[in-house]
């Protein structure tokens, strides 16, 4: 795997099987750094023509309301507007509050171009991703 981008929010890796591996770091995030992280995620996907990502959120802190709103109103909305279909396998955060915030984000994404599934382990998540378009 090749490192594509890294900042305090996490690391983006190019997986040789044709998907982005999005690894969230633990700790508090600020909105501009979070926005940069997801913007680079979009750029990585589009650069390769990929439509799949594995989001490892196991160590992630809960999404803030600002982050949730930005994901819904900009990041997912942009993909929807462009007709860019995404498949996301999500490794569930260990923190209960992060799980709750993830559920809110996923509920917000119901009308978007994102098709997702949540998993407790990486092998199951990867197997699901490989079955997608």
Image (cartoon, grey):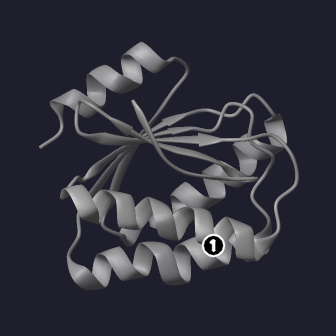
Q: From the viewer's perspective, is 114 left or right of 56?
A: left
At horizontal 47% and vertical 19% (from top left) the residue drawn is 122
Q: Position of residue 77 (x, y in %)?
A: 41, 80
Residue 100 percent location from the top left of the image: 73, 47
The picture quadrant where one finds residue 124 is top left
**Helix, strand or loop for disc 1:** helix
List x then y, in percent, for residue 127. Answer: 28, 20
* Mark 1 residue crowding within 10 angstroms, few (<14) / some (14–19) / many (20+): some
Against 15, residue 81 (above or below) is below
State the residue position of label 1.
Answer: 35
Labels in figure, total: 1
Q: Is residue 40 left or right of residue 87?
A: right
Task: Residue 79: tell me if it is visible.
Answer: yes
Above or below 110: residue 124: above
- Residue 111: x and y, percent? 37, 71
Q: Residue placed farthest to the right in the image?
A: 28
Residue at left 81%, top 34%? 95
* Image quarter of the N terminus: top left
Quick check: 80 left or right of 61? Answer: left
**Residue 108 is at least partly visible in this image:** no
Q: Quadrant of the C terminus?
A: top left
């Amino acid at each position: 795997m090749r490192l594509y981008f890294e900042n305090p929010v996490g690391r983006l890796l190019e997986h040789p099987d044709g998907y982005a591996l999005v690894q969230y770091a633990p700790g508090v995030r600020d909105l501009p750094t979070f926005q940069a992280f997801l913007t680079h995620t979009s750029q990585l996907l589009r650069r390769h023509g990929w439509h799949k990502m594995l989001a490892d959120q196991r160590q992630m802190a809960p999404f803030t309301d600002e982050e949730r709103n930005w994901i819904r109103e900009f990041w997912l909305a942009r993909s929807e507007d462009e007709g860019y279909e995404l498949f996301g396998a999500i490794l569930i955060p260990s923190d209960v509050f992060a799980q709750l915030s993830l559920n809110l984000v996923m509920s917000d994404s119901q009308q978007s171009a994102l098709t997702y599934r949540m998993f407790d382990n990486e092998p199951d998540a990867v197997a699901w991703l490989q079955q997608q378009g």
